[in-house]
Image: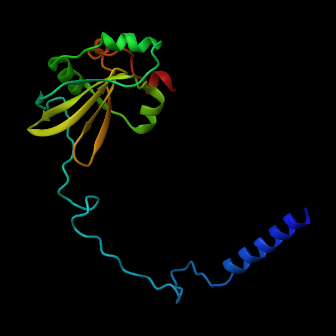
Amino acid sequence: MKLVYLTLIVGSVGLTTACGSRNHTLNGGQDSANPVVDLKVPSTDKATNSNLKKIALTPNSVIKVKSINWVQKDARPNDSMVYKCKNWSLTHESIETILKNGAPIDMHDFSYLYYVLPCEVKGSVEIDRELYSYSINAGSFFTISNDDTTNFYGCNAPTCKKFFLMQGGDPKRDIE
């Protein structure tokens, strides 16, 4: 037991000494042992590149579905959704309707108001002559992605209800 206390005391003394060995300043001063290095970010960095394509999805967007791939994620075999997923499908027209009626959702609403079901449809879509990837989950939400951005949308419009296995949340109805 004495050895444990001795180890703790020696360790804390060493930590205190190491932390107090330099005079650190917070007022913009510089420690002479650690000079500030000016880093230049190359203009090809995507975070600062002004040529990034923004995802623009409006009710007037011209949408053409290019591909449809059904995906069923791993789920317990006795999960009731597995059976429902086997009978779930979307057509080109229903995908276009979903995309036109979706509303942007933030990650908070997505986390608390939507179920991620084991079945989804993925593919590519042309929106206003720009090519994007999409993923529609049977839980009433979808994503639209380009090379550097993914936007989340919920489809809670009455016209969308028939296309999904579960209705997405409504912040006014479900949270307030």
Q: Can you give x and y, in whole percent of width and height, for residue 47 in the image? A: 29, 59
Q: Can you give x and y, in whole percent of width and height, for residue 13 in the image? A: 78, 76
Query: What residue appears at the point 21 percent right and 42 percent down from the top-left corner?
Result: 55
Q: Which residue in the rendered view is the most extreme toward the left?
A: 129
| Left or right, 74 with reference to 98 | right
| Left or right, 20 with reference to 43 | right
Query: What residue appears at the point 46 percent right and 86 percent down from the top-left corner?
Result: 35
Identify whether 38 is placed above or below 149: below
Identify whether 6 is placed above or below 172: below
Quadrant containing the N terminus in the rendered view? bottom right
* Displayed quadrant of residue 92: top left
Q: Can you give x and y, in whole percent of width and height, for residue 17 in the image? A: 72, 80
Query: What residue appears at the point 86 percent right and 70 percent down from the top-left corner?
Result: 6
Identify whether 120 is placed above or below 53: above
| Left or right, 26 with reference to 74 | right
Please tell me which residue lies in front, 148 or 18. Answer: 18
Q: Which residue in the rendered view is the most extreme toward the bottom?
A: 32
Query: What residue appears at the point 28 percent right and 17 percent down from the top-left corner?
Result: 160
Q: Which residue in the rendered view is the most extreme toward the right?
A: 2
